[in-house]
Amino acid sequence: MKFKIITITLITLLLFACEEKDKKVVPKEVIKEEPIIVEFGFTYNDYLVVQDTVQSGDTFGKLLEENNIGTFKVHDVTEMVKDSFNLRDIRIGKPFTLLKSKKAPHQLQVFIYQKDNIHYSVVDFRDTLVVAYNKQKPITIKRRTIATSISGSLSETLSKNEVDASMANNLAKIYEYSIDFFKIQKDDKFAVTFYEKYINDTIYAGVERMESSFFEHKGKKIYAFPYKLDSFSKKEDYYDEEGKGLKTMFLKAPLDYFRISSRFSPKRFHPVQMTWKAHKGTDYAAAQGTPIKTTASGVVEKTGYTAGNGNFVKVKHNGTYSTQYLHMSKILVRKGQRVEQGQVIGKVGSTGLATGPHVCYRFWKNGIQVDPLSQKLPNTEPMNEKHRKNYLAYIAPLKRELDSIATLQFKK
C-alpha cells in the first residue's frame, strides 16, 4: 500500500513538471527611463528642443517670425523685452536654443541666446506677458600654482601644463617693460599662482585672474604681484618683491605700430619751410587715423591748433615731465582731463606744417625739450612708506608659497 502511494506521488510530480516545461516563459517588459536633462534652468524633457546658431542676416525679430509665437506680435515682443535683452547683441555664430511645445503646432515657449559660454539671455513666452532676463551658468573658481621651465614658446609651455594659452598674453603684458618675450630662452623658468573658472564645477572656462608670479630670464628673477595702493585706485598695478613698479613711467612710443621718419636733432632741413632749423621732436610716421596714445598718465594741459603744429595735445605728467603730440587729424580729449598711460588721445593726421600723416612727439624735462630716446626714464611713482609696509605684509605669504612650490618642482 505504501509502495502504491509513493508511485502515484512520483507520477503526479512528473506530469506536473512536464506541464510546466510546456508552458512558455514570458519575460517581463523592462521600461527604460529617459534621463532627465536640465539646461539653463529648464527640463528639456518637457519640450521639443531645437538648437542652432545665428546666421548672417538673422535678427531677433526674424528668428521669432520663423517660429510659432502664437498670438504674440513680433513688434510687441521686441518692445516688451528691449529693456532687459539687448536685441542688437545678437552676433553671427552664437548659439541659441528654442524650447517648443511637444504638441502641434509646436508653439515657441522659451528662446535662449548664449552670449558666451557663461552668460545667456532668456525670453519666456509661457505666460500672458513675455518676460526677458539675463543669467549666467554656475561658476566655480579654483586656485592653482604651476612652476615650470620654458619648452618651446610661452603659449606651448602653458598648454603642456594644461593652462589656457591665453595666459601667455597676460604674462607678456605684465612683464612687457622687463622681458622681451621674443627672446626668451629654453630653460628660462617661471611660476604663477592663478584662479581658473569652471562651469558647473566641471567645464573649464579659462583663467579668471593671476595672484602672483615670477619669471627667471637670463639668470634674473622678476616677481610680479597685482596690488591697489588704495580703495580709490581704478585698477591694479604690478609691483616686484620690494614694492617697485614693474612698468616704466613712459611708453616707448605714442603709437603701437610706427616708423621713425625723423629724429630729434639740433639741425635738420625742414621739408616744408625749406630751411635748416632745430627739430625738437621725434616724428613717427603712420597711416591717417592711427590712434595716438599718451605715453604716461597725467592731466591734459593744453589742446588746440596752430599753423605749425596743427591739431595738438599737451599733457603734464608731474613737476618734471610733459609731452606734446602734433599734427593730429582729430583731438579726443579736452583741457583739464585726467588721462591714463596708453589712453588714446587723438588720431594721426597731417595738419599744420606736415608733408604726410605722422605724429611729432615732443618731450619736456624740467621745462627743456629733450630727446626721449636718449633719456633714462623712471619707473612708476614709488610707493610711500605706509603703502610699502602694507604691500610687503600682503605679498609675504604669496611669495613664500610661490617659492616653495617652485623649489620642489625644479628639484625634480
Image (spheres, grey):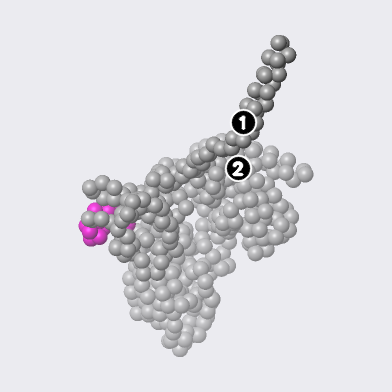
Which percent across, then down, holds residue 353? 40, 82
For the residue marked with disc 1, what is the amino acid?
Glu
Say which label, 2 or 1, has the lower sequence index. 1
Query: Residue drawn 36% across and 72% down?
Result: 330
183 and 68: which is toward the camera: 68
Dominant SS in magenta: helix
Q: Quadrant of the N terminus?
A: top right
Tell me where residue 194 appears, x and y as whole percent.
57, 45
- Residue 313 vs 156, above or below: the answer is below
Q: Amino acid at mark 2?
A: Arg
Disc 2 element: strand
Residue sticking out furthest to the right: 412
Determine the residue positioned at 43% across, 60% down.
Answer: 52
Q: Work out whether residue 368 or residue 61 is closer to the camera in this orientation and state it.
A: 61
Q: Are marks 2 and 1 in contact (CB under 8 Å)?
A: no
**Is residue 83 located in the magenta-colored stretch of the structure?**
yes
**Res 132 seen here:** no
Q: Position of residue 314 (x, y in %)?
A: 39, 66
Residue carrying label 1: 20
What residue lies at 30% left-to-right and 58% top-to-bottom? 68
Q: Dot 2: within a 10 Å radius of its alpha carbon, few (fewer than 14), some, or many (20 or more) residues? A: few
**Residue 104 in the image: x percent, y percent?**
32, 54
Query: Residue at left 48%, top 76%?
Result: 286
Highlighted range, magenta:
73-87
> Could you tell me which secondary element the residue under label 1 belongs to?
helix
Q: Is residue 250 magenta?
A: no
Residue 104 lies left or right of residue 273; in this view the side is left
The answer to whether residue 119 shows anywhere in this view is: yes
Q: Which residue in the protein does label 2 denote? A: 144
